[in-house]
Amino acid sequence: MLSDRLPSSRREPIALRAGSKPIRHLYVHTPFCATVCPYCAFYVHTGSAGEMRSFVNALLCEWERLRWSYRVEIETLYLGGGTPSLLPLDAFRRLADVFRPWESVEATLEANPRTVTREKAAAWRELGIGRVSLGVQSLDPAVLRTLGRRHAPQDVERTVATLREAGFGNINMDLLFGVPGQSLASWEETLARVIALGPEHVSAYELTYEEDTPFFEARAAGMWREDENLSIAMYQTAGRLLEGAGYRQYEVSNYARPGWASLHNQGYWKGNDYLGLGPGACSTVGFRRWQNRRDTGDYIAALSAGQDPPREEEALSKEVRQRERLLLGLRTSCGIPASWIKGEEEEARALIGQGLAELSDGTFRLTAEGRLLADGIAGLFLG
């Protein structure tokens, strides 16, 4: 359990020990949103421009403390949230001045379509952001209302045009299916309109009912019910339409045109080490994992006082890390080394016989149909 406070920053810098591998992935959590969506369980809240600037100051302090303790050679930077596109431009420029030196970094910024302006888009591009991930969720006004989203379909179309005009050649669109009241026809129309807009990457997630959200409470009260058959049909429809349009499913929920798969996400799925900055952000380095407390005020106060932010830490065994790699690897089109399922050959043969998996060149991977059942299949190999 994450329960013990992280030791002082005066501890021995574990990642600087001889032979240690560099950390190549950095996640920055921005906890601010204009409104909090009723299905969202991420650590987010509203905030003033002044609080956002104080947050950025604290964030840069945390970065300074971490980058001297670990061997960091950043290849991917992901500015997530929350809604980092809400940050005032002067605050964003301060961030960019620190992270811009890595010219070859895949730098992603999450954005709500309503927050994107020509001025912001031009500044983001000038400051080194090369990839924008839009929280579209749906292009059906009724579904957007159910989700508590404030943007309209035309905002998405305008935003894509604005980003293209600013020179962005790498756009992702996040979509949700299995939303209460959403029909298969509505989902098909959203997919068709997204394809017409031509993003390089599409993430299509099934809605999950997370604890401590209004959606979870509504389902618990019997207001909404999940329709597994409809969700399966929506998943299969996404695969059929997106792959028919030239996208490749490279993970259960992710599709990309050739050459545009997310390097940052692949880092997670391969079990690579990563650092997370910001309140609520998680980091994994070797066999240590820690998470900053989900409290922006405490985060800013601690770093302003020259201290590490309040954190909780857990030690990970080799077995836990390996289980995570297996579970995540089975969700990808790359699969896992066949050696990882040694002793479970009978189960593997059964899956292959059912058309749910395949084995070739020493790699065991699930088919598109198998990836629909990835979590359950992983349980066969995890005991």
Image (tube, helix red, strand yellow):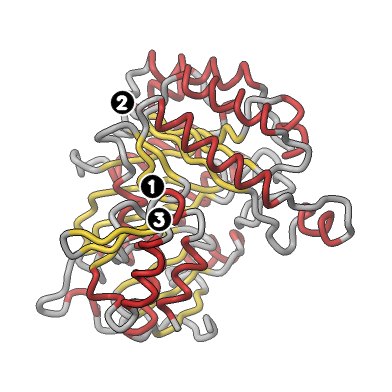
* Residue plotted at (37% across, 57% down): 366
**Which of pointers 2 and 1 lies earlier in the amino acid sequence?**
1
Which SS class for mark 1? strand
Q: Which residue is mark 3?
A: 355
Instruction: Kindly identify the amino acid type of the residue bearing the numbered disc 1.
Output: Tyr
Residue identified by numbered label 2 = 126
On screen, residue 54 versus residue 330, left or right, reads: right
Q: What's the distance in space between the residues labelled 2 and 3, CA to CA?
A: 48 Å
Quadrant including the C terminus: bottom left
Q: Amino acid at mark 2?
A: Glu
* Mark 3 residue crowding within 10 angstroms, few (<14) / some (14–19) / many (20+): some
Residue 176: x percent and y percent?
60, 40
Which picture quadrant has residue 107? top left
Which residue is labeled 1 in the image? 78
Q: Position of residue 237 (x, y in %)?
A: 54, 35
Residue at the far front: name it.
353
Q: In the structure shown, which secondary structural element does the residue marked by tag 2 occupy?
A: helix
Alpha-carbon span between mark 1 and mark 3 = 36 Å
Q: Is residue 64 above or below residue 340?
A: above
* Vertical arrangement, residue 196 with respect to residue 207, above or below: above
Task: Point out the tag, 2 or 3, that comes first from the N-terminus.
Answer: 2
**Residue occupying image coordinates x 59% and y 43%:** 50
Q: Are marks 1 and 3 in contact (CB under 8 Å)?
A: no
Q: Estimate the x, y position of residue 183 in percent, counting from the top left.
A: 72, 33
Q: Quadrant of residue 259?
A: top left
Depth order, front residue of 63/360: 360
For image coordinates 50% across by 33% down, the residue present is 134
Q: In whole angstroms, how far apart are the C-alphas of marks 2 and 1?
A: 17 Å
Name the foreground residue: 376 vs 20.
Answer: 376
Please determine whether, in this image, residue 209 is positioned above or below residue 1.
above
Q: x, y (%) of residue 277?
A: 42, 59
Q: Which mark is residue 353?
A: none
